[in-house]
Image (cartoon, rainbow, N blue to C red):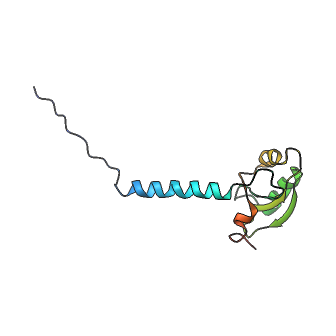
Amino acid sequence: MARDESIAESRWPVWLNPIGLLLVSFVAVAALSLKARPGAEVVAVAFPPWWSQQRTFLAAAAADAAIVRQTAVLSILVVRPADEGGLTRLREAGVWLVMDPQAIATCFAK
């Protein structure tokens, strides 16, 4: 008896490989360029996009962060965190991402 050892064709389109690599490299470059410098006094913080502007302000205030300015995107604020553990309190208040405010200044200026 002979066994049927045929190789199944892949259903993954070949063009998805370079698209996937492009997306991964874009995210990696964006994450590295937007990363806040250690010891920065002022940072940009991104809250969940479905939060209202009032909720983002209340969350920043609950973390003892002084709001420096708003951006065109309601869920992104530029804040001055409290000295001791300010970034930790911001993350506990709901911040998803902490960024360098100069890196996003031109993109999200109001």
Residue 51: where, in percent of width, then height? 74, 58
Q: Residue at x 30, y 47 (%)?
A: 10
Residue 67: where, in percent of width, then height? 86, 61
Question: With respect to residue 2, does 56 lie above or below?
Answer: below
Query: For the C terminus, which image quadrant?
Result: bottom right
Quadrant in the rendering for residue 104: bottom right
Q: Residue at x 80, y 58 (%)?
A: 56
Residue at the farthest bottom position: 110
Q: On the picture, is 96 further left or further right than 29? A: right
Residue at the farthest top position: 1
Quadrant in the rendering for residue 99: bottom right
Instruction: Give 41 or 51, whichever is nearer the viewer.
Output: 41
Instruction: Give 1 or 82, whichever is nearer the viewer.
Output: 82
Instruction: Give 104 or 37, whichever is nearer the viewer.
Output: 37
Residue 27: where, in percent of width, then height? 57, 56
Question: With respect to residue 56, does 93 lie above or below?
Answer: above
Residue 95: where, in percent of width, then height? 75, 51
Residue at the farthest front position: 38
Query: For the N terminus, which image quadrant?
Result: top left
Figure disc tally? 0
Q: On the picture, is 26 further left or further right than 84? A: left
